[in-house]
Image: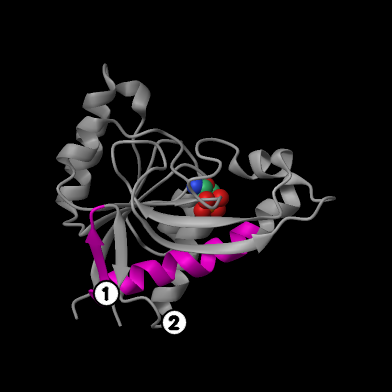
């Protein structure tokens, strides 16, 4: 199986990027990150990528007249690096329909809740405030909605009554670092089959 080429879009810390890179180094993820694109100057994720000799580009959304122009530049980079998948890893902007329709390759996201619960921002705070007993994370394909696309993998963690948002976030993050690399590996093995909104994982 050829290695999947991943274009990672991220805005911050980059721990999910790191988990994917570590999985690849350990031979558990048959993929390579070909470019990391960030909307945030100096984001840790860019430093992590550069440290691994991966092209790491800050593309400033403010330097474009319209969101569409900014997104067209992102897509230009994704195509230039011949990515097979776009991996959102803490990318804090909502991609427009224009981007999604013109990407030409699947887009994956990881969200820190058990979707469809707690879509959007501050999912961990939403879970703590709601008083749910369980939360977790979801790897899903991106469609034109926000956090609504077909679900590939989920992982569950307990939520305790005394939990702070930070404590829950950390518990969820540990699972994120397991499921995102695993989902990418399943894709690389051709085991992810999309049937409408249902995703079948073949043996
Ligand atoms: C993660 O919690 C992810 O679920 C959310 O943004 C955060 C990114 O963390 N989409 P990191 O930058 O990968 O460390």
76 falls in the magenta region: no
The image position of residue 134, as x and y in percent, is 66, 56
**Viewer-nearest residue: 164 or 132:** 132
Q: Is residue 99 left or right of residue 108?
A: left
Q: Secondary structure at mark 1?
A: loop
Q: In this view of the protein, can residue 59 be seen by the observer? A: yes
108 and 57: which is toward the camera: 108
- For the record, the magenta segment spans 172-196
Q: Position of residue 102 (x, y in %)?
A: 15, 39
The quarter in which the C terminus is drawn is: bottom left
The residue at label 2 has a CB less than 8 Å from ligand 1: no
Place of residue 88 in the rendered image (x, y in percent of width and height, measured from the top left): 38, 49
Mark 1 and mark 2 lie on one chain; the one further toward the N terminus is 2
Which label belongs to residue 59? Answer: none
Q: Residue at x 31, y 58 (%)?
A: 198
Q: Which mark is residue 191?
A: 1
Query: Cβ of disc 1 within 8 Å of ligand 1?
Result: no
The kind of secondary structure element at disc 2 is: loop
Q: Main secondary structure of the magenta part?
A: helix
The image quadrant of residue 99 is top left
The N terminus appears in which quarter of the rendering? bottom left
In the visual, does 82 lie left or right of 109?
Answer: left
The residue nearer to you, when weighing 176 against 43, is 176
User: Is disc 1 in contact with disc 2, using a CB cutoff of under 8 Å?
Assistant: no
Instruction: Please tell me which residue lies in front, 191 or 36.
Output: 191
């Amino acid at each position: 199986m050829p290695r999947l080429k991943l274009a990672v879009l991220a805005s911050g810390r980059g721990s999910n990027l790191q988990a994917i890179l570590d999985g690849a180094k350990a031979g558990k993820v048959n993929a390579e990150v070909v470019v990391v694109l960030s909307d945030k100057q100096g984001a840790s994720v860019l430093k992590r990528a550069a440290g691994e000799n991966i092209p790491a580009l800050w593309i400033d959304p403010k330097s474009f007249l319209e969101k569409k122009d900014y997104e067209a530049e992102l897509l230009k980079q994704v195509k230039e690096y011949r990515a097979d998948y776009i991996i959102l890893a803490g990318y804090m902007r909502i991609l427009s329909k224009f981007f999604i329709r013109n990407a030409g390759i699947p887009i994956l996201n990881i969200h820190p809740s058990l979707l469809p619960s707690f879509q959007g921002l501050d999912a961990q705070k939403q879970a703590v405030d709601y008083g749910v007993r369980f939360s977790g994370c979801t790897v899903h394909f991106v469609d034109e909605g926000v956090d609504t696309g077909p679900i590939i993998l989920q992982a569950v963690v307990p939520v305790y009554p005394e939990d702070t948002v930070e404590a829950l976030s950390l518990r969820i993050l540990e699972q994120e670092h397991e499921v995102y690399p695993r989902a990418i590996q399943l894709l690389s093995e051709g085991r992810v089959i999309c049937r409408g909104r249902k995703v079948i994982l073949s043996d």
